[in-house]
Image (cartoon, helix red, strand yellow):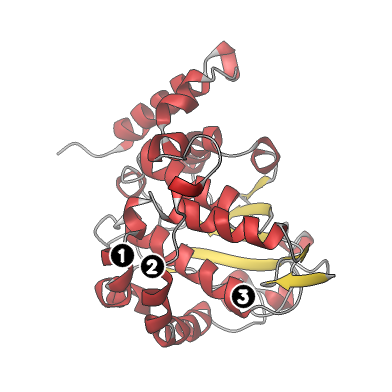
């Protein structure tokens, strides 16, 4: 017998669904920006930013012809103070939790559109290796969703540096699914139907701000539910074998110790440090 878990895949009732919820609970336990205090105050502390002052990150209505969900991540203006990265990641995970609860028909994976039009070196300097790894471990390991593609639009020379910075923390399949669209949106339409896209990208789905505000309302309606979810964490004392600790899941040392060979024979750890240094060079002098 099978059951639909959220909107992502069909799983057998046991043990797979239990295992997936265990993964979510396990990763909730050690992530600093998902503590009870942070969750319980989440909507009140980031409410102005949720309303569109800093970013839009809504899942778009409908699915692609091959059954995939499209999520847009767009900054609003270059003039804002460099964003609180933990707030942004928290918001993405909150939307992910709602989708797990609400979506009732199968989704064949997620497609992200990253809009780099307002990205600056000062913004990306806030993304440290530690916090990027924490977030990507959650996205890739805890949630029952396959990341199918990442599309970067409104690209700039800074984008290559950012992509190379993030690649060490991505699975190989995902690293090969990152597509840049430097010459407008026509090439994007080969992957995502134009009628699904917001008007800002030449689509027919209406302004992205309208879609985003619908998600703001939905997040508000889930305030009490988010408080209740904080009680769901893995009891590591009952895990067979070695309990999973913060370092097991998120330790950077393990990533750097693997020494997977990249360009010019350098380890991934070395490349991450080089990309971080390159970002610092792009920052204006104080």
| Residue drawn at the location 27% of the way across and 55% of the way down | 82
Spatial CA distance of label 3 from label 1 is: 29 Å
Q: In the image, is 112 to the left or to the right of 244?
A: right
Q: Residue 177: percent from the left, percent from the top? A: 69, 45
Disc on res. 25: none
Pick the residue in front: 257 or 157: 257
Q: Would you name the residue on which mark 2 appears?
A: 230
Q: Are marks 1 and 2 in contact (CB under 8 Å)?
A: yes
Disc nearest the viewer among 3 and 1: 1
Answer yes or no: is residue 54 visible.
yes
Q: Would you name the residue on which mark 1 appears?
A: 36
Q: Residue 148: percent from the left, percent from the top? A: 71, 53
Q: Would you name the residue on which mark 3 appears?
A: 60
Secondary structure beneath dot 2 equals loop
| Residue drawn at the location 53% of the way across and 75% of the way down | 98
- The image quadrant where one finds the C terminus is top left
- Chain-order first, disc 3 or disc 2: 3
Q: In the image, is 38 to the left or to the right of 110?
A: left
Pick the residue in front: 196 or 268: 268
Judge whether 53 appears above or below 151 on screen: below
Pick the residue in front: 142 or 184: 142
Judge whether 19 appears above or below 45 on screen: above
Tally of numbered tags: 3
- Chain-order first, disc 3 or disc 1: 1
| Quadrant of the image occupied by residue 197 | bottom right
Answer yes or no: is residue 184 visible.
no
């Amino acid at each position: 017998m099978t059951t639909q878990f959220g909107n992502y895949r069909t799983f057998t009732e046991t043990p797979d669904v239990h295992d997936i919820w265990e993964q979510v609970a396990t990763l909730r336990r050690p992530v600093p920006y998902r503590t009870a205090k942070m969750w319980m105050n989440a909507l009140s502390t980031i409410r102005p930013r949720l309303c569109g002052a800093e970013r839009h990150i809504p899942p778009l209505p409908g699915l692609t012809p091959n059954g995939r969900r499209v999520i847009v991540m767009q900054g609003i203006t270059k003039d804002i103070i460099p964003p609180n990265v933990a707030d942004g990641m928290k918001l993405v995970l909150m939307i992910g939790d709602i989708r797990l609860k609400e979506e009732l028909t199968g989704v064949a994976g997620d497609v992200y559109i990253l809009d780099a039009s307002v990205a600056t070196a000062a913004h990306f300097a806030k993304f440290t290796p530690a916090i990027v790894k924490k977030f990507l471990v959650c996205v890739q390991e805890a949630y029952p969703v396959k990341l199918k593609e990442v599309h970067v639009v409104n690209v700039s020379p800074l984008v290559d540096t950012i992509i190379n910075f993030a690649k060490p923390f991505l699975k190989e399949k995902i690293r090969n699914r990152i597509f840049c669209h430097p010459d407008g949106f026509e090439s994007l339409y080969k992957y995502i139907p134009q009628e699904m896209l917001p008007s800002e990208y030449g689509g027919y789905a209406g302004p992205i701000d309208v879609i985003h505000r619908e998600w703001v309302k939905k997040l508000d309606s889930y305030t009490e539910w988010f408080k209740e979810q904080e009680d769901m964490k893995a009891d590591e004392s009952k895990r067979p074998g070695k309990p999973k600790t913060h370092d097991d899941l998120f330790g950077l040392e393990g990533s750097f110790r693997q020494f997977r060979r990249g360009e010019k024979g350098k380890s991934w750890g070395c490349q991450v440090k080089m990309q971080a240094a390159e970002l610092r060079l792009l920052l204006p002098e104080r």
